[in-house]
Amino acid sequence: MKKVYLDYAATTPLDSEIKKAMLPYMDKEFGNASSLHSFGRMAKEAIEKARQQVAVFLNCRPDEIIFCGSATEADNLAILGAVKIAQKKGLKPHIITTAIEHSAVLEPFGQLEKEGVEVSYLSVGPEGIVRVGDIEKVLKPNTVLVSVMYANNEIGTIQPIAEIGTLLKKQSQKIIFHTDAVQAANYLGCDVQKLQVDLLTLSGHKIYGPKGAGVLFIRKGIAIEPMIYGGHQENGYRSGTENVAGVVGLGEAVGQIQKTKNEIQNIKRLRDELISNILQNISKTSLNGSREQRLPNNANISFAGAEGESILMALDQEGIAVSTGSACASGSLEPSHVLMALGLSPEKAHGSVRFTLGKYTTEQEIAYVLKVLPKVIERLRGISPVK
Ligand code: PLP
């Protein structure tokens, strides 16, 4: 059966060049980067090369890069670490985030809220974009942290990070600014000086690199409390023997992003073809989130009168892999918190499907999806109780 993968926001295949770069570190180069002998030094050198690769991409110093076990861990370290340090100084912190963040950000915020920390959740407009003026309105003298994702994982909308950075810099107190750039990294500039962020998160497996490898950029001079204590690896911010192969793969993946940039126009062209064809040829469909301010690989579409999960299963039977909202939240019967934040009805949110393309997506694959999809929707609408 033909197999078409349109779930690049959930994870990307491992690029063969990246895999090749990783393999020695799962074989002969097995040293512990903390060991002083030659095996250890080889591992340490490989990690430092990767740190340099990430630093070039982010336009920062290598010692501002911390390797973590995932982007979820990096997000948790950023948020919990910023709040814990403020509390240590005797402050009663106020923190701000948005209603459309990934659970890797929303859950630590929720946990802190349960512990008595004051939290503001910003709503978004119907286009799925945060208004900078809304942030200004909720700032307080005790605001210590703002966390806003660079691009949304469900609807691909791009947030005005540099403008928020400018606003926060103007404030009389120091407010730490964190952005989760996991979904943005393949497509948008991640220069931390231009974005004016203090903390930034990346994930290996969304950029054709390995799973279980993440990055937190921590600007020099910004203090956060570590979350894991032990052997003081990663500047004391993330103890634990480094996953050398994972770090090497992440470094290579970041280094290769420039190559993906050449493929963006093609990805966007195929994505646009997918969107306009669906909207024109399948009745009662609509695109969720801004058409312009969105990642070039994302199409999130509501199909009235059909259940997103049923569409996913039916397409899977035809060899096509898509998603309903974020992979981490799938299986939950709750409608997507992102689509609800856009103001969609629960029915419309339930009837939504996310198609995310990548560098291996072909014209033939999109043509196949456009052939199969109308029949699937027609059949499901015929049997769905929701019309
Ligand atoms: N942040 C965003 C925006 C994501 O899309 C994801 C993954 O879906 C994560 C964080 C979590 O990344 P990881 O799987 O590396 O923990």
Image (cartoon, rainbow, N blue to C red):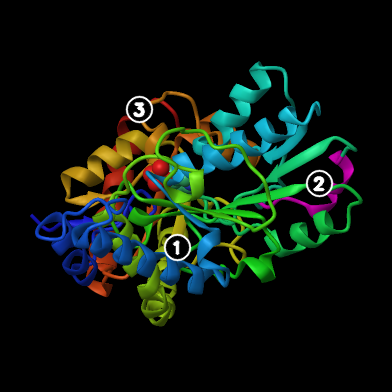
- Is label 1 in a helix, a strand or a loop? helix
- Give the image quarter of residue 73: top left
Residue 154 at least partly seen: no
How packed mark 1 is, by other alpha carbons closer than 10 Å (few <14, some 14-19, many 20 or more), is many
Cα–Cα span, label 1 and label 3: 26 Å
Examine the structure image and report whether residue 136 is included in the region drawn in magenta. yes
Q: Residue at x 62, y 66 (%)?
A: 192
54 to 331, vertically: above or below: below
Ligand 1 sits in which quadrant? top left
Which badge, 1 or 3, is on the more N-terminal residue? Answer: 1
Q: Nearer the viewer, residue 365 or 383?
A: 365
**Residue marked by disc 3:** 331
**Residue marked by disc 1:** 275
Left or right placement of residue 50 versus residue 140 in this view: left
Which region is colored magenta? 129-139
**Residue marked by disc 2:** 135
Mark 1 C-beta to ligand 1 under 8 Å = no
Q: Nearer the viewer, residue 9 or 39?
A: 39
Q: Are marks 3 and 2 in contact (CB under 8 Å)?
A: no
Q: Nearer the viewer, residue 225 or 13?
A: 225
Q: Residue at x 65, y 37 (%)?
A: 99
Q: Position of residue 315 (x, y in %)?
A: 24, 46
Q: Amino acid at mark 3?
A: Gly
151 to 193, vertically: above or below: above
Q: Which mark is residue 41?
A: none
Q: Residue at x 39, y 45 (%)?
A: 70
Q: Amino acid at mark 2?
A: Ile
Cα–Cα span, label 1 and label 2: 32 Å
Which of discs 1 and 2 lies nearer the camera? The answer is: 2
Which SS does the magenta portion mostly show?
A: helix
